[in-house]
Every structure is written in structure tokens, then in C-alpha cells.
Image (cartoon, helix red, strand yellow):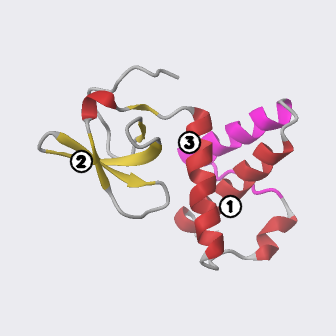
């Protein structure tokens, strides 16, 4: 994954803002600033577009786990979801990305990262696929 500064953005792209150390979802370019929203929602912030880089897989996973943990604290999760690993929905790019992260974590024998990817996949499926 590149760490070169980004010069053009697609809405929804996950970008790392080195000024804040956060990963955000690109929303729009407003004046001289890129507008980023935290993964999972929250208060947007402005960033200098020339300093933004594509989020690495590790940064994406960390931001997603942070968002899932915040939802859990708010009480929007169901413990019955933990009985079995979620299956990716066919033809869903985000499901495929999270499944790839999970498979990589399994190959590395990183049980914590496997669990994190499972949590993110469940949350994505609840939000996007009514699962």
C-alpha cells in the first residue's frame, strides 16, 4: 500500500491524516481542505489534502475496530453474533476486504486480529446487508 500523499480522492476512500494520526472516510473537498469523517461516523474534520495518504490495512483495521468498540459501548451489538464466524456476502467489496484481512490474520496465527476482522465483518453486514 502506498504512503505517498494523495492528490485526488474518491468519496468513501479511507485516508490517513498524519496531522491527527487518524483514519477518516473522505467526504469532499471544500475550499483548500479535504473533509474526513471518522470510520463508523462521528464529527468530521478538515485536513490538508497534500498530506493525506491511503490508509494501510493495519490502519483500516484499527479504525474499524475502534468504531466497533464505540458501538459496543453504546449497546448496539448482540452477543449472539459471536457464536460463529460471519461469511462474506457474495459480490460485496467490503465483505471481501474484511475476509481477506481475516484470512491474512489466520495465516499469521494472530487470533486477536482474526477476532477484530470478524467483529468488523459482522458490523458491516448489520449496517449494509441487514444481517
Quadrant (top left/top right/bottom left/bottom right) for the C terminus:
bottom right
Q: Residue at x 54, y 32 (%)?
A: 56
Q: Main secondary structure of the magenta part?
A: helix
Magenta region, residue range? 85-107
Residue situated in front as seen by the camera: 33 or 102? 33
- Residue at far front of view: 19
Side of 66 relative to 46 (left or right): right
> Distance between the Cα atoms at labels 2 and 1?
28 Å
Please tell me whether mark 2 sits on a helix, a strand or a loop.
Answer: strand
Please tell me whether mark 3 sits on a helix, a strand or a loop.
Answer: helix
Q: Residue at x 27, y 26 (%)?
A: 7
For disc 3, the marked residue is 60
Instruction: Return the disc, 3 or 1, that comes first in the chain's sequence.
Output: 3
Residue 124 among those drawn in magenta = no
State yes or no: discs 3 and 1 in contact (Cβ < 8 Å): no
Side of 1 relative to 30 (left or right): right
Where is residue 6 drawn, in percent x and y? 33, 27
Q: Residue at x 65, y 44 (%)?
A: 98
Where is residue 77 drawn, in percent x and y? 68, 74
Residue 99 among those drawn in magenta = yes
Please tell me whether mark 1 sits on a helix, a strand or a loop.
Answer: helix
For disc 1, the marked residue is 122
**As displayed, is residue 17 above or below residue 64?**
above
Where is residue 70 drawn, in percent x and y? 59, 67
Residue situated in front as seen by the camera: 88 or 45? 45
Judge the density around disc 1: few (<14), some (14-19), many (≥20) Cα neighbours within 10 Å: many
Please tell me the numbered disc located at residue 22. Answer: none
> Distance between the Cα atoms at labels 3 and 1?
16 Å
Instruction: Return the disc, 2 or 1, that comes first in the chain's sequence.
Output: 2
Please tell me the numbered disc located at residue 28. Answer: 2
Instruction: Return the disc, 3 or 2, that comes first in the chain's sequence.
Output: 2
**As displayed, is residue 120 above or below residue 101?**
below
Amino acid at each position: 500500500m502506498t504512503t505517498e500523499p494523495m492528490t485526488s480522492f474518491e468519496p468513501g476512500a479511507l485516508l490517513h491524516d498524519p496531522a491527527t494520526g487518524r483514519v477518516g472516510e473522505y467526504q469532499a473537498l471544500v475550499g483548500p481542505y479535504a473533509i474526513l469523517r471518522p470510520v463508523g461516523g462521528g464529527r468530521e474534520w478538515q485536513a490538508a489534502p497534500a498530506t493525506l495518504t491511503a490508509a494501510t490495512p493495519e490502519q483500516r483495521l484499527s479504525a474499524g475496530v475502534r468504531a466497533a468498540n464505540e458501538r459496543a459501548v453504546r449497546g448496539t451489538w448482540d452477543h449472539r453474533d459471536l457464536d460463529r464466524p460471519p461469511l462474506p456476502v457474495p459480490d460485496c467489496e467490503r465483505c471481501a476486504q474484511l475476509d481477506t484481512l481475516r484470512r491474512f490474520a489466520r495465516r499469521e496465527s494472530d487470533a486477536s486480529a482474526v477476532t477484530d476482522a470478524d467483529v468488523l465483518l459482522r458490523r458491516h453486514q448489520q449496517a449494509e446487508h441487514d444481517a
